[in-house]
Image: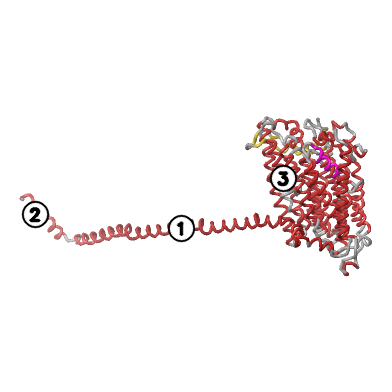
Amino acid sequence: MDPIAVTMLRWIPLLPLAGAVVNGLFGKAIQRRAGKGAVAAIAVAPVVAAFAVSVAVFLRLLGLDPERRLLLDVVWRWLAVGSLRVDVAFLADPLATTLLLVVTGIGGLIHLYSTAYMRDDDAYWRYFAYLNLFTFAMLVLVLADNLLLMFVGWEGVGFCSWALIGFWWREPVNTGAGNKAFIVNRIGDTGFVLGVFALFWALDAAGHGTLVFRDLQRHAASLDGRVLLGVPAATLVTLLLFVGATGKSAQIPLHVWLPDAMQGPTPVSALIHAATMVTAGVYMIARLHFLYALAPATLAVIAGVGAATALGAATIGLVQNDIKRVLAYSTVSQLGYMFLALGVGAWTAGVFHLVTHAFFKACLFLGAGSVIHALDHEQDMRQMGGLRTALPVTFSTFLVAALALGGMPLTAGFFSKDEILWHAWSSPYGSALLWGVGVVGAALTAGYVGRQVLLVFFGASRVEARRAAQVRESPPAMTGPLVVLAAGALLIGFLGVPESLGGANPFAAWLSPVFASEHVDAAHAAEAAHDARLEWMLMAVSVAMAAAGAGVAYLIYRRPAGSADALAAIAGGAPYRLLLNKYWVDEIYWAIFGRGTFALARAGAWLDARIIDGIVDGSAAVTRAIARLEGGFDARVVDGVVNGLAAATYALGGRLRRLQTGHINAYLYVVVGAVALVLIARLF
C-alpha cells in the first residue's frame, strides 16, 4: 500500500526531546529559581502534547479505509551508500499507533505520578530530563520507518534505562544494577546488529538491498531458498534479531538484568520495565512478522523460550519478599506469554497482551510505589500488612490490577491471556505442551500476586511503629494515575473479546491491515475454523487453575502464622532455597563469566608479565649484552688498532723529526753518504 505523506508524526518524538533538552541544559537553574513545579511542567506538558498528537494520528487512520491506513513523514535523507537508501522517516500504521498511545498515554500518567513521588529529590530536574529523553527514544523506536532508525531508538532506550536505573548513583548497588542492565542489553544488541547486517546482505544479493519495513515486506519472499553460513537466510536473520529481543525484553537466558533494575525509582520501573522498553522486543518481532513467518524453526525457538520464561519467572515470583521484585519477575513472566503468542504465530494476541499488560502492570508498580512512599521507602512485604484501610485508593486499584494480572474473568488480563492460551493450543505452531506450560504459569501467576495482595494489604499490621504513625494515602498526583490505570486494567480487555464470548474483537480488526499479508497469520487461520466448545473448555480450565492458585495463596497466608514456613521447609527447604535464590542463575553466570573473565584477565596478566615481558626483557638483555661486546670490541680492537697506528706514526714521526736538524753540513754528509752507498751497490 502507498503511504499518505504527512508532517505531523515528527512532532510526537520531538516534543519530549524538547522537554529533555530544556531540563537537561537549564533544569538546574530553573529548579533553583522557579521551583520544581516549573521543571515538572516542562517535563509533563510535552508528553501530554505528544499523546494529543498520537490521538490525532489514531483518528486520522481510523477515518481511512483499512487498506490505506499508513502515514509517512520523511524528515531527511540519512544514508545513501551503494544500494542502501535510508531516511530519517516516521511511519504510523495501526500497529505503531497502538504503541504510540501506550507510550504517550501511560507515559504521561507516569510522568504525572513522578511529580509527587520524586518531589523530595534534589536532582528532580535531572530525573525528568532522563524520563523525557527515554520517551523520545522509545517513540523513535516505535515510529521508525526502517531498521537502522529503529536501532537508534533501541540503543537510546538502553542508554536511558542505564541512567535511570542508576539514578541514585551514590549507592553502589544502584550503579551496579544499571551497569548490569547495560552490559546484558549490549550482548543482545550484538545479535540485533548482526541480524540487520545479515538481512541486508541476503536481500542485496537478491537485488533488493533495503532496510525499510515496507520494502522488506514486499521483498521478504526473495529470502526463500537462500543460505547464509550453511543456514537458511530467513532462519539466521530472525534468530539473530531474536537475540536482540531476548536482551531487551528479558527472556531466558538474558533475563537477569530486569529484576535488578528495580533499584531505580519506582516510576522508572513502571515506565521502562513494565509498559514500554521491555516490550520493544515484542514490537520488533511483530513489526517483522513477515520475516518470522518464513522461519518456522525460529518460531519454535521463540515459543519455547517464551514458555520457559513464563513458567520459570513465575516460580521465582512465588517466594520473593521485595514488593517490586515480585512484580519484576511477573514482568519477565508476562513477557514470556507475549513471546509464546508470537512463537505460535498469534501476532495480534501478543500485541493485545502487550497493551493490557501495560495497564495492569503499570498500575501495580505505581501502586507498589504508593505503598513504598507511605512506608518511608520500606519494600519488604514481611514488614507490611493491614494497609487496605490506611491506603484505600492504593488498595482498590492494586486489587483490580492484581485480578487482571491473575487472569480473572472480565478483566483485561483474562481476555488477552486466554487468547494466547487458545492459540498455543490451536495454532499449527502450537501444541498441548505449550498450552499446558501456559496454564501452569497462569496458576502460579494468580498464586504469587494473591500472596502479594495478602501480605501487603491484609492480616495484622507488621509495620514498625515509627512508620505506622505516618502511614497515609498518597497525594492526588499519585492516586489519580492509579485510578485511570486500574480502569484500563478492568476495561481495555473488552476491545478484544473473542467471537466465542460473543465479541467482535475490534482490536484484531484494527490490526488486521498490518498482519494481513501473503503470509497467512497462523492464529487467524486457526480461529477461522475452531471449535467454540473446545475454547470454552480450555478457558474454563485456565480460569480454574488461576482460581486454584489464588485459593492456595489464601489458604497459606490467611491461616495462622507458620503455614508458609512449614511449606518452605518441605524437603529440607531445598525447593524454597532454589526459588529464593532464583535458581542461582546469577551465581552461575558470575562463576562462568564473572570469575571466568577475571581468571582470563589474571592469565593474560601472567602471560604479559612472564612471557611477553620476559621476551621483551630478554630481548633487551641480549641487546645490552651484544652492545657491551660491541663496545668492548670497539674499545679494545678497533680503537686499539687505530690508536696503535696513530702511536706508531707518531713515534716514527718523532724519530724522523730528529733528522731535520737544520744544519747544511749534516745534510751534505747525508747526501755524500747516500751517493757512496749507491756507487758501492752498482759495483757489486
The amino acid type found where label 1 is placed reads Gly
Out of 478 and 569, give the one closest to the viewer.
569
Distance from disc 2 to disc 3, alpha carbons, whole Å, reads 114 Å
Q: Nearer the viewer, mark 2 or mark 3?
A: 3
Residue 673 seen in the figure: yes
- How packed mark 2 is, by other alpha carbons closer than 10 Å (few <14, some 14-19, many 20 or more), is few
User: For the residue marked with disc 2, what is the amino acid?
Assistant: Ala
Q: Nearer the viewer, residue 57 or 235?
A: 235
* Residue 597 position by quadrant: bottom right
**Disc 2 and disc 3 in contact, CB within 8 angstroms:** no
**Which mark is on residue 676?**
2
Left or right: 658 in relation to 34:
left
Of marks 1 and 3, which one's residue comes earlier in the chain?
3
> As drawn, which residue projects farthest toward the left?
683
Residue 125 spot, x, y in % from top left? 81, 56
How far apart in space, not on screen, are marks 1 and 3 (Cα)? 47 Å
Placement of 134 over or under 644, stated as above or below: above
Q: Earlier in the sequence, mark 2 or mark 1?
A: 1
Residue range (magenta): 416-427
Residue 638 image point, x, y percent = 32, 57
| Label 2 – label 1 distance at C-alpha | 72 Å
**Residue 244 tag number:** 3
Looking at the image, which is closer to me, 44 or 114?
A: 114
Q: Is residue 375 above or below residue 184?
A: below
Tell me the tag on residue 618: 1
* Foreground: disc 1 or disc 3: 3
